[in-house]
Amino acid sequence: MPAVLETNALCKRFGKVEALRDCDVSLPAGKVTGLVGPNGAGKTTLLQLAVGLRSVTLGTIRVLGLDPAEDTVTLLSRVGYVGQDRPLYLDLTVAETLELGRRLNARWDQEFARSRLARFDIPLDRAVRSLSTGQRAQVALTLALGKRPELLLLDEPVANLDPVARLDLLEELMGAVAEDGPAVVLSSNVLSDVERVCEHVVILANGRVRIAGDIDELERTHFLVIGPRKAGPAAAGEDVVDVREAERQTVRLVRGAVTWGNGDGTVTRPATLEEVVLGYLRSSRGEVR
């Protein structure tokens, strides 16, 4: 099955700053992918490039097999996108917002959009301006889902939401994906949210892809090797991602084959997704961008 979003040596510069460099990703169809990384890692830039809001400096990007710069109109009819600021016309009512969605999207599903908002008790006659942050987030997501997209791109969809609103939105997102099956790419700094809804993850830092893969596979192939503070160097052939030294122990994140306990008190165990992500992010500190 072809990738829904694929880049090759992708680079995006803003002046002298490289927001993305040598970025190679291939995101699978039919899955929820999480873009994970610190602020400034390039997550938002990648999503903006994917919908033609930014132009590529070098390299290529294809979304659903199309070039976002050349096939913008066709692509946007097949892709739902919610930006970080969830742009909505504040002076329109909710009903007027849905009507705008209907007029702009040939595949718009008005019945779905209305019933979805009804589940959250969002009045159609209310001005968007008067809605809470959580309600606005639900309206923005409804606009993206109502066009029945093949691909849904969400930039920090639960940012600034309270815990209940965040959980509601994530559960609704999982339900919508299960029903209709669009591929989803979402950026997030909250690892618990990524673990809750994502099957595939891309770890970005300093504009570069550190590693990408299915979460199950990353957890299966990464290990924590915990040993004494004065433990010797890693064994030959070990792919050490990150090393942390505490007062009494050394902790190594290792990818692939590891040397199990060697009699000096060393313990090896599978790494969690959080430990994998933090290990790759720590290893990227201090790089010149």
Image (cartoon, rainbow, N blue to C red):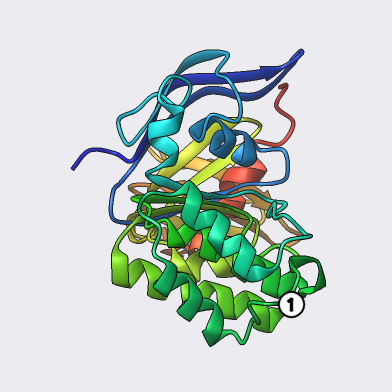
Across and down, in percent, residue 153 comes to 49, 49
Three-letter code, disc 1: Asp
Question: Which residue is found at the position 34% from the left and 59% from the top?
Answer: 220
Considering only vertical position in the picture, is 27 above or below 126?
Answer: above
Asked where in the image residue 287 lies, by quadrant, the reply is top right
Of 272 and 12, the residue lying toward us: 12
Across and down, in percent, residue 34 comes to 49, 53
Across and down, in percent, residue 251 comes to 59, 56
Asked where in the image residue 250 lies, by quadrant, the reply is bottom right
The quadrant the N terminus occupies is top left
Of 284 and 235, the residue lying toward us: 284
Tell me if 215 is positioned left or right of 232 in this view: left
Tell me if 131 is positioned left or right of 239 in this view: right
Label 1 CA crowd tier, 10 Å (few <14, some 14–19, many 20+): few
Please name the residue that numbered disc 1 is placed on.
162
Considering only vertical position in the picture, is 137 above or below 151?
Answer: below
Tell me if 173 is positioned left or right of 279 in this view: left
The quadrant the C terminus occupies is top right
Asked where in the image residue 166 lies, by quadrant, the reply is bottom right
Question: Which residue is found at the position 41% from the left and 64% from the top?
Answer: 270
Question: Which residue is found at the position 66% from the left and 51% from the top?
Answer: 244
Q: Is residue 247 visible?
A: yes
Tell me if 76 is positioned left or right of 57 in this view: left
Of 203 and 93, the residue lying toward us: 93
Considering only vertical position in the picture, is 119 above or below 94?
Answer: below
Considering only vertical position in the picture, is 71 above or below 129?
Answer: above
Of 286 and 147, the residue lying toward us: 147
